[in-house]
Amino acid sequence: MKVTVLGYWGGYPSAGGATAGYLITTDEGNILLDCGSGVMSRLSFYTNVESLSGVILSHLHYDHMADIGILQYAAVGARRTGRMTNKLQIYAPDSPVSAMQDLTGNHSDVYAINPLNKVSLAGAEIEFIPVQHTISCYAVKIKYGGKTFVYSGDTSYCESLIDFAQNADIFLCEATICEGSRHTTGEGHMDAVQAGTIAKKANVKKLVLTHLPHDGDFEFMKKTASEVFGRPAYIPNVVSTFML
């Protein structure tokens, strides 16, 4: 399993960058996890819409779903030209209802995430738990080939993430809050120390900080997360790929 970071900014992208978007590649297909602003242009370097086994949206804020409509345009074109026979498979929270309804169309099959049910995509087993954000949001666990990837979604400090991420090979955790930063009010988000604390308690093998503030001190964030975690913490860039 391979994790390619397509975008990692919180709120809005930098010049040439993208907000939340992660491509999970197995031997059996590709899963797009979140589809924020700028993600579609980054995705095109690695794959195309007809090669996606499915799309998972952790929640329906624009920095995690702004490009989903653009991806659906690509699906319409791929279906019209015969490059894609199936509809785009999308899994998302069922609220806000208006945002969920906007995803529907003859180009997509849209399924409401149910934390009681596992999903299978690209040969991987996928689980969800609700986390503590300002709207309905889910953390995501993807298991494939004996390896485990966990993504926090957007959340404040959440004890349930410790069990959910237990012994994960990679834990991709939001760290939006940074001392001195004015990027966020902090509601529904964590800082690097909290991310490192969950990673430590969950005994994950690798911690990657994401959903980053534009005015954040990334070296400080890495340092403080690493001190708590007890291992190096990583900050992604536009070409970050992690092998499991």
Image: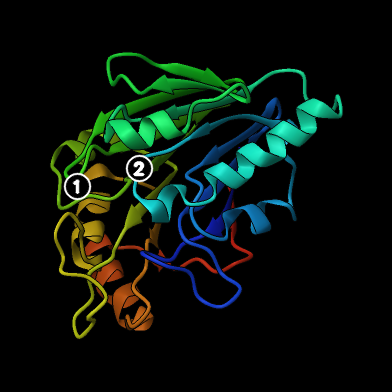
Q: Nearer the viewer, residue 223 or 130?
A: 130
Name which of mark 2 and mark 1 comes first in the sequence. 2
**Which residue is denoted by mark 2 in the rendering?**
60
**Residue 23: x, y in percent?**
59, 45
Tell me the residue at 30%/36% (across/down): 138
- Amino acid at circle 1: His
SS for tag 1?
A: loop
Task: Locate residue 74, reporting x and y percent.
Answer: 71, 40
Residue 225 placement, left or right of 3: left
- Name the mark on residue 114: none
Residue 113, compared with residue 49, is above or below; it is above
Mark 2 vs mark 1, foreground winner is 2
Residue 72 shows in the view:
yes
**Among all residues in the image, which is located at the extreme top?**
117
- Residue 188: image quadrant is bottom left
Rendered residue at 28%/66% (across/down)? 176
Q: Answer with left or right where residue 60 lies relative to residue 20.
A: left
Any mark on residue 133, and which? 1
SS for callout 2: loop
Query: Is residue 206 visible to the viewer in this orientation of the structure?
Result: no
- Residue at point 34% right, 13% down? 117
